[in-house]
Image: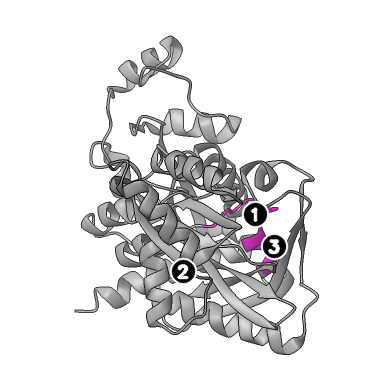
């Protein structure tokens, strides 16, 4: 059997750089287990925090250690600088290393902006190579919460009330900003959540209960992104469903996240022991079926491919299910919700990685049928 060479693309210049490394390590481990070790060879491709594509020896170093490359003003530290000089690389583009041409399929696991938002997907599309996950459109819609919500509305998916805001409104004249806050209060009331439209992992998100908190949260969120969204607060259970496939996707069992903090913020999300995953969730059968159907509908609404995790609010008091968001490159560690949901559905982590690579090749072949 001829092995396929998988370009495992990770790191990236986003706030989720370290999460990406952890996900990449889990995927690399899965590719070396069972039948996968006879089917695939891994070529690690690491993008450092400055956006530089590092040579494979440094990429392997990061993958092995689990730690980001040490940088000083965007340049590798002395030890790594000598390695770069020896390799002949100072700033590496994806077409600048001959070994990249040997890659049969790419596996991007870049969380957040500059990796999950369609930018890298556009680059890989231009390179005319198969890659795991959504294309430019699905990635962009899945990243921008405002565009995502518009797509969900068009698809008839119920969601919480929200107000879209531009940074220019926040940084406007003293006359305009108070009017913006008036409008938000009139439409949503308190509590509500202020979020940057294009960040993941709950970065820049704040729960607000007063005018003063609203103003501060808008100012803070605007420092992260020029597009913001303010959502009405809702008393609900937070449940998630994983989707796998291309044009005929399947939904996993449903899981639930519980926590003691005020909301599912960055610290709660990434600090061990602060959040609990319940898989499968203890929900009525009819609600589970509804969530699974809505997850697939959301996946198709944004033209996602390969994988996605879809998050929902289940309002137990009324029986309502409201869609929250779709994540086209969810966390992919062995303890992350996405692979654990599929594990509970009967697909192991190594099988899941194998299936995603096959889906990438299938979609590429279908797109280039002529």
Q: Are marks 1 and 3 in contact (CB under 8 Å)?
A: no
Q: Give the range drawn in magenta.
A: 330-341
Q: Residues within 10 Å of mark 2 (few under 14, many from 20)?
A: many
x then y, percent, for residue 332: 59, 54
Q: Tell me: 207 left or right of 168.
A: right
Which is nearer the N-term, disc 1 or disc 3?
1
x then y, percent, for residue 50: 36, 29
The numbered disc on residue 246 is none
x then y, percent, for residue 55: 37, 31
Q: Residues within 10 Å of mark 3 (few under 14, many from 20)?
A: many
Q: Mark 1 sits on what residue?
A: 33
Secondary structure under tag 2 reads strand
User: Is residue 205 visible to us here?
Assistant: yes
Work out whether 305 lies above or below 118: below
Is 357 in front, or is 39?
A: 357
Q: Mark 2 sits on what residue?
A: 306
Q: Tell me: 287 left or right of 62.
A: right
Q: Distance from label 2 to label 1 (Cα)?
A: 21 Å
Q: Distance from label 1 to label 3 (Cα)?
A: 17 Å
Residue that appears at 44% across and 29% down: 57
Which is nearer the N-term, disc 3 or disc 2?
2
């Amino acid at each position: 059997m001829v092995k396929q060479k998988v370009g495992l693309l990770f790191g990236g210049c986003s706030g989720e750089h370290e999460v990406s490394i952890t996900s990449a390590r889990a995927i690399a481990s899965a590719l070396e287990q069972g039948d996968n070790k006879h089917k695939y060879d891994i070529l690690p491709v690491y993008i450092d925090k400055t956006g530089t594509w590092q040579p494979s020896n440094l990429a392997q170093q990061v993958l092995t250690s689990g730690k980001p490359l040490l940088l000083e003003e965007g340049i590798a530290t002395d030890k790594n600088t000598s390695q770069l000089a020896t390799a002949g690389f100072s700033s590496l583009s994806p077409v600048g290393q001959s070994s990249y041409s040997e890659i049969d399929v790419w596996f991007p696991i870049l969380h957040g902006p500059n990796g999950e938002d369609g930018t890298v997907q556009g680059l890989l599309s231009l390179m005319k190579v198969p890659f795991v996950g959504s294309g430019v459109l699905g990635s962009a819609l899945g990243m921008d919460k405002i565009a995502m919500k518009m797509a969900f509305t068009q698809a008839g998916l119920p969601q919480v009330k929200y107000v879209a805001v531009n940074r220019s409104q926040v940084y406007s004249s003293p006359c305009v900003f108070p009017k913006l806050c008036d409008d938000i209060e009139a439409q949503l009331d308190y509590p509500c959540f202020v979020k940057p439209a294009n960040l993941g992992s709950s970065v820049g998100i704040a729960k607000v209960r007063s005018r003063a908190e609203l103003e501060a949260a808008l100012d803070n969120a605007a420092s992260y992104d020029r597009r913001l969204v303010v959502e009405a607060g809702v008393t609900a259970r937070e449940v998630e469903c994983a989707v796998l496939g291309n044009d005929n996707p399947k939904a996993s069992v449903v899981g639930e996240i519980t926590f003691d903090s005020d909301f599912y913020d960055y610290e709660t999300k990434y600090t061990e022991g602060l959040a609990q995953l319940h898989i499968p969730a203890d929900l009525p059968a009819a609600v589970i079926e509804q969530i699974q159907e809505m997850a697939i509908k959301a996946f198709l609404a944004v033209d996602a491919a390969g994988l996605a995790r879809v998050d929902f609010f289940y309002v137990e008091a009324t029986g309502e299910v409201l869609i929250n968001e779709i994540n086209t490159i969810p966390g992919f560690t062995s303890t992350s919700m996405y692979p654990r949901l599929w594990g509970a559905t009967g697909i192991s982590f190594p099988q899941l990685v194998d299936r995603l690579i096959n889906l990438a090749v299938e979609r590429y072949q279908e797109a280039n049928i002529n």
